Image (tube, grey):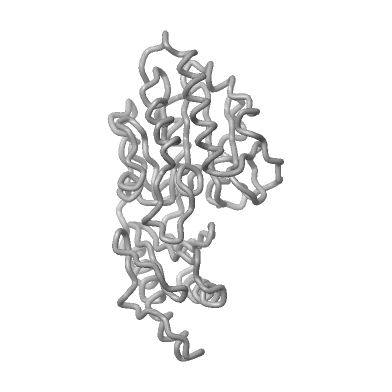
């Protein structure tokens, strides 16, 4: 989250069926941009178990085939992992790594059809330092408290990530970052782990520390979800935009839409936000998307496909 996208208010919860979707259902063209974890998929202790709620999956499938309607997933996950876990329909655009990766398929804007920047030598040095710092945690903690933790060699990524212990280092390795997951861990252990991993920033100020729901991400790219959303809008030129997000990193996307009059920003869950509207959880998201699919289908039958 950038400094100028800090949360500003705490809007009350609004029932999904009470939100006015008129500017989206009747728009000449619509972009429906959605975060994955915590929005389409309930948060999990093991992030590899995250899956989209069936009702949301069905609604997205329906929306993705409507004329002049584009669905996009915008996530902190890398694009490869996002595609594997979300299994989106053909034609759904993907933004991964907090905006550093943009995959638009056969977009009419070739320069943004596929954006996946290389890791520079300096950035690789930072990633190596992050890895070394995380792997040193077990030794440092054991020396200080005598606690038994998993060794650095047991740090797993992707589909090999293991759970089952509340004193376990869980690291998701992405092309441009490392994410340390602390959901479900012993509180004291999680606090010590968090303090240890962010200390690497003192040695490498170029590392960006991103705090989220029970995660600490150490990134070497500065892209944000606001950047990713901007790419989506540039590629599709929609007349109306919907964005749903649940985490601090989604505030950049909400900020991006503040000057777009035909937009609807919705925060999912608690915590202050720049979004003017708030709904409760992924179940409420599923209800909203189902309603949007049904109402837009009735409005756009005469329009050409997106």
Question: Residue 14, position in %: x, y?
Answer: 67, 36
Vertical arrangement, residue 7 with respect to residue 113, above or below: below
Depicted 116 relative to depicted 61: above or below: below
**Left of 140 or right of it: where is 212?**
right
Seen from the viewer's position, the closer of residues 300 and 226 is 300
Vertical order, 261 against 104 (above or below): above
Could you tell me if residue 202 is visible in this image? no
303 sits to left or right of 108: right
Q: What residue do we see at 71% from left, 46% from top? A: 10
Q: Position of residue 179 (x, y in %)?
A: 42, 62
**Residue at 56 percent of width and 44 percent of height:** 281
Work out whether residue 143 can be spotted: yes
Q: Eyeballing the image, is 190 above or below 263?
A: below
Residue 103 x, y percent position in the rendering: 33, 39
Q: Nearer the viewer, residue 87 or 124?
A: 87
Residue ID at (46%, 91%): 143
Question: Which residue lies most toward the top here?
Answer: 302
In the rendered image, residue 122, in percent from the top left (x then y), is placed at 35, 65
């Amino acid at each position: 989250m950038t400094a100028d996208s800090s949360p500003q208010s705490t809007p009350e919860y609004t029932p999904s069926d009470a939100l006015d979707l008129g500017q989206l259902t009747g728009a000449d063209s619509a972009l429906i941009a959605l975060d994955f974890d915590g929005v389409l998929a309930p948060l999990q202790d093991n992030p590899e178990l995250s899956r989209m709620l069936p009702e949301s999956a069905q609604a997205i499938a329906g929306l993705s085939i409507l004329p002049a309607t584009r669905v996009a997933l915008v996530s902190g996950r890398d694009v490869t992992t996002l595609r594997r876990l979300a299994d989106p329909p053909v034609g759904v655009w993907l933004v991964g790594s907090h905006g550093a990766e943009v995959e638009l398929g056969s977009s009419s804007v070739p320069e943004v059809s596929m954006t996946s920047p290389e890791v520079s030598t300096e950035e690789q040095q930072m990633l190596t330092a992050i890895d070394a710092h995380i792997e040193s945690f077990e030794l440092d903690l054991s020396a200080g408290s005598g606690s038994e933790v998993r060794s650095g060699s047991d740090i797993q990524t992707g589909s090999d990530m293991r759970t089952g212990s509340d004193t376990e280092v869980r690291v998701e390795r992405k092309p441009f970052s490392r994410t340390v997951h602390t959901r479900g861990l012993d509180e004291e252990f999680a606090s010590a782990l968090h303090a240890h991993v962010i200390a690497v920033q003192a040695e490498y100020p170029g590392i960006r520390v991103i705090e989220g729901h029970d995660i600490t991400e150490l990134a070497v790219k500065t892209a944000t979800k606001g950047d990713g959303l901007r790419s989506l809008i540039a590629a599709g030129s929609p007349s109306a935009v919907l964005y749903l997000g649940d985490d601090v990193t989604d505030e950049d996307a909400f900020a991006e839409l503040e000057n777009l009059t035909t937009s609807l920003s919705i925060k999912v869950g608690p915590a202050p936000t720049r979004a003017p509207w708030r709904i409760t959880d992924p179940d409420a998201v599923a209800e909203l998307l189902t309603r949007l699919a049904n109402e837009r289908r009735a409005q756009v039958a005469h329009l050409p496909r997106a």
